[in-house]
Amino acid sequence: MINVTVWNEGLHEKSSKEVAAIYPDGIHNCIKEFLGTNEDLNIRTAHLTQRRCGLTDDVLNNTDVLIWWGHMAHGAVPDKIVQKVYDRVLGGMGLVVLHSGHHSKIFRKLMGTTCNLRWRDGDRERVWTVNPSHPIAKGIPEYFTLDIEEMYGERFDIPEPDQLVFMGWFSGGEVFRSGCCWQKGLGKVFYFQPGHEGNPTFHNEYVQKIITNAVYWAAPQNPVIADPGCPHAKISPEQQYKEGK
Ligand code: ZN
């Protein structure tokens, strides 16, 4: 089983009737629902207004892949929690950052850059699969269209991705690196651009497939290491070999 925690800020759904109409149970439960069709995924949700943002030590220590959606309250996530998520990613936990999560504390900390981009609400997007052999692109056509999505355009201030899987083209003329992969420490990080709260993006079958693929890709292959430390290798393996140990 892969333990997945879907973290959602969860504020837009409460403050906007339009957003609540698209995601009546919140973006987190929409994601939980489509991921839940996979029997080997054990999914829980967490959100900002819960104690410790729903990311207690117990939850984090039992999360293999964390999905992150946030927008209007990035600053409300305490640095202490961000540090714990960061440490867990370096130890091997997978992280999938969606849409406006580009400005979340955790994504900026992992990237080490501003993660700024250009944006404009209400455009048509074509998501192009530029790396069809990548595991996250499995079952995704060479391109698919989102009739309405927020435009995110270059330059996106991120370090060069280890792998670029999707490129977005917008009807306004902009392009964007929409699906990017990095390894950070022992953890895998995937950023995916579509997912504006006012659009039905998370109901799109290909978006659902991409997020599902990303969970399997980012899942650690070995147990997450809580504290890798920095050990003093006093006695070398060669020394031990010579001593017959
Ligand atoms: Zn947005």
Image: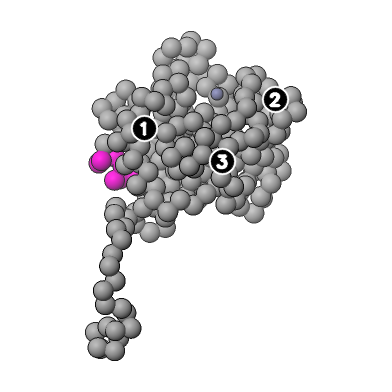
Residue 60 located within the stretch drawn in magenta: yes
Residue pictured at 62% horizontal, 46% vertical: 165
Does residue 37 appear in the picture of this structure?
no
**Which residue matches tag 2?**
124
SS class, disc 3: loop
Q: Is mark 2 within 8 Å of ligand 1?
A: no
Query: Which residue does the numbered mark 3 point to in the structure image?
Result: 158
Q: Residues within 10 Å of mark 1 (few under 14, many from 20)?
A: some
Which amino acid, by three-letter code, is at mark 2? Arg
**Is 188 situated above or below 24?**
below
Q: At 45% across and 17% down in the image, what residue appears?
A: 12
Q: What stretch is highlighted in magenta?
A: 57-63
Q: In this view, does 242 lie above or below 183?
A: below
Upstream in sequence: badge 3 or badge 2: 2
In the image, which disc is placed on residue 45? 1
* Residue neighbourhood size for the residue with mark 3, other residues' Cα within 10 Å, grouped as few (<14), some (14–19), many (≥20): some
At mark 2, the secondary structure is strand
**What x and y, as percent, mark residue 75?**
39, 25
Residue 174 image position (x, y, % from top left):
71, 30
Report, in whole angstroms, how far the alpha carbon at label 3 lies from the one at label 1. 28 Å
* Label 1–label 2 contact, CB within 8 A: no
**Mark 2 surroundings within 10 Å by alpha-carbon count, few (fewer than 14), some (14 through 19), many (20 or more):** some
| Quadrant in which residue 61 is drawn | top left
**Amino acid type of the residue that numbered disc 1 sits on in the rendered structure:** Thr
Disc 3 marks which amino acid? Answer: Ile
For ligand 1, tell me if the residue under mark 1 lies within 8 Å: no
Left/right of residue 18 with respect to residue 9 in the rendered view: right
Residue 222 appears in the rendering: yes
